[in-house]
Image (spheres, helix red, strand yellow):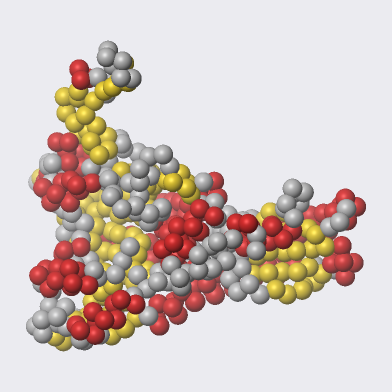
Amino acid sequence: MAIELKGLTKRKDNYSQWYNELVVKADLAEQSAVRGCMVIKPYGYAIWEKMQQTLDRMFKETGVQNAYFPLLIPKSFLCREAEHVEGFAKECAVVTHYRLKNDPEGNGVIVDPDARLEEELIIRPTSETIIWGTYKNWIHSYRDLPVLCNQWANVMRWEMRTRMFLRTAEFLWQEGHCAHATAEENEARTVQMINLYAEFAEKYMAVPVIRGVKSPNERFAGALNTYTIEAMMQDGKALQSGTSHNLGQNFAKAFDVTFANKENKPEYVWANSWGVSTRLMGALIMTHSDDNGLVLPPHLAPIQVVIIPIYKNAEQLAKITESVMPIVERLTQLGISVKYDNAENKRPGFKFADYELKGVPVRLAIGARDIENGTVELMRRDTLEKETLPLAGIADHINTLLEDIQQNIYNKALQMRQERTYICDSYDEFKERIEDGGFFLCHWDGTTETEERIKEETKATIRCIPFDGDETPGVCMVTGKPSKRRVIIARSY
C-alpha cells in the first residue's frame, strides 16, 4: 500500500476513526486554528462545487433566483419569533464590539471597551429573520408574489462536539426562502423542494433516502411542518440530509409582512425555507467508501477517469502519450473529466494507491507492451475489478461504464439500507437491537413524552414519519396506546 493508506483504520474496528482519518488522508479537509471549524481543501471543495453547481441549476429550473443577505443579524431581529430564538439561542455567536486597540498596560491587543455596539449582532445561524426583515420592503401587493430566493452562504452555530463535514461550528450551505400569497402555494413549494433534494441525493449522490415529515419535537424552530430526507450510513446510523420547512405566517407576522390581495384587503404572507449543507459531503463519504478510501459516484467525482502511463524511458512515455491523447480528447468531448498523470515525481504504484484513496471511478494503466498489443488495463473503483480491453473505442466504453458504476453504487447502498431496516413491535427488543444500528419501523403513540423517553433511554430519535410508509394502525411499542402508523426510529449523526 502507498503511504497515504498506511494506518487507515478499518471500518469494522472503529467506524468513527475510519471516517476522521479518511477525510484527512483523501485531502478533503483538515482542522483549522479556529475551534470547531475546518479548512476544506481543493479536492474536497471540488466535490462540493459539483454538488453546488448541480443543485443551483435544479433550483433555477423551478424559478428560484440567487441573492445574498448580511452575515450579521441584529439581536432584536432574532428575538421577534419566540420559538425561533429559543431554538437557536444556545448556538449563537455574538458580536459585541467593533474595534481593537493596544493595551496601555502593555498586554498586547485588547478589545476597545469604548467601541461597544449599541445593539449586539448575531453571526447568522440561519437567515429567516434578516430575510423577512428585508421582504417587508419588497412585498406590498399580490403582484409582488411569489418571491423565490436562495442564497449560497456560510453560517455559524456554536457546536460543542464537532466532526468535519458532519457538524462544524461554521459550515457552507444554501438556504432558500420563498414567500407566497396562499397556504396552498406555500405547501406545494415546501414539498417540491424536499422532493428536489431527494432527486439530487439519489440521482447524483447515489444515496437512497427516505422522504418524510418530522415529528413536532424534531421540526425546525418556528415551523408548522418540517419535511426531511433521511439517509442510512454504513454503520446503521441515520443522517438528516436535507430539510424543507413550512413556516406558515409566523415570520410574516413577526416582521409585519403583509400584501394587498386581489380584493385589496391586507393579508399576511406565507413562508417556507429549505436547505442542504456540506453535511452532504459526510453522507457521500459514509454511504459509499471502503477500507481502501473514498468511493465517489461518477456524477460528482472531480476526476472521473485517470490515465497512468507505465514506462522506463522518455521514448516509451512519448509513444504512450501519443496513443493516450486521442482518448483524452474523446473523453473530454463526451463531457467526462479526465486526468493524464504523466508526472515523473511519483511512481505508478504510488499513483494507483493515491487515486484509489481519492475515489476516482475509473483508472486506466497503459505501458509499452499495451501500445504494442493495442490494449489498456481498466480498473473500476466501486468493485476494484480489473480487465484488459482494446484501446480502440475505450472512451465510448468508459462513457457507458460510468453510468453502470453510478447505478451499482446506488444499488449497493439501497441494498444495505433494506437489509438493515426492521419492523419492531417490542420496546425491549428495540432497546437491544438499536445497539447494532439500523432503521426501525415502529408504532408510536404520537406524544412528546413517549418520544422523549425513547431518546433518553436509547439515544435514538424519530427520524421521520415517511411519506410512503405503513399506515396500518397499531399500538405504541413503548406505551401500548393506539398508534396511527409506523414511524422510523434510529440513532443519528
Residue 43 placement (x, y as % from top left): 55, 50
The residue furthest front is 106
Query: In the displayed structure, does residue 34 sit left or right of residue 181?
Result: right
Q: Quadrant of residue 470?
A: bottom left
Left or right: residue 269 versus residue 469 is: left
Residue 283 is situated, as x and y percent measured from the top left of the image, at 42, 62
Whether residue 461 can be seen here: no
Q: In which quadrant will I find the C terminus?
A: bottom left
Q: What residue do we see at 29% from left, 81% from top?
A: 433
Whether residue 437 sits left or right of residue 351 in the image: it is left
Q: Residue at x 54, y 68 (%)?
A: 291
279 up-or-down from 477: above or below: above
Determine whether 406 is above or below 336 in the image. Answer: below
Residue 100 appears in which quarter of the rendering? top left
Q: How many marks?
A: 0
Could you say which is closer to the camera, residue 409 or residue 98?
98
Name the residue: 10% across, 81% down. Answer: 479
Q: What residue is rendered at 50% in x and 59% in y?
A: 22
Q: Is residue 295 above or below residue 63?
A: below
Percent x, y for residue 154?
36, 43
Q: Which residue reaches farthest top?
A: 104
Along the line of sight, the residue nearer the viewer: 387 or 145: 387
Q: How far from the left and from the top, in percent, is residue 259?
A: 16, 44
Task: Decide if residue 402 is on the left or right side of residue 461.
Answer: right
**Quadrant in which the N terminus appears:** bottom right
Depth check, front residue: 313 or 76: 313
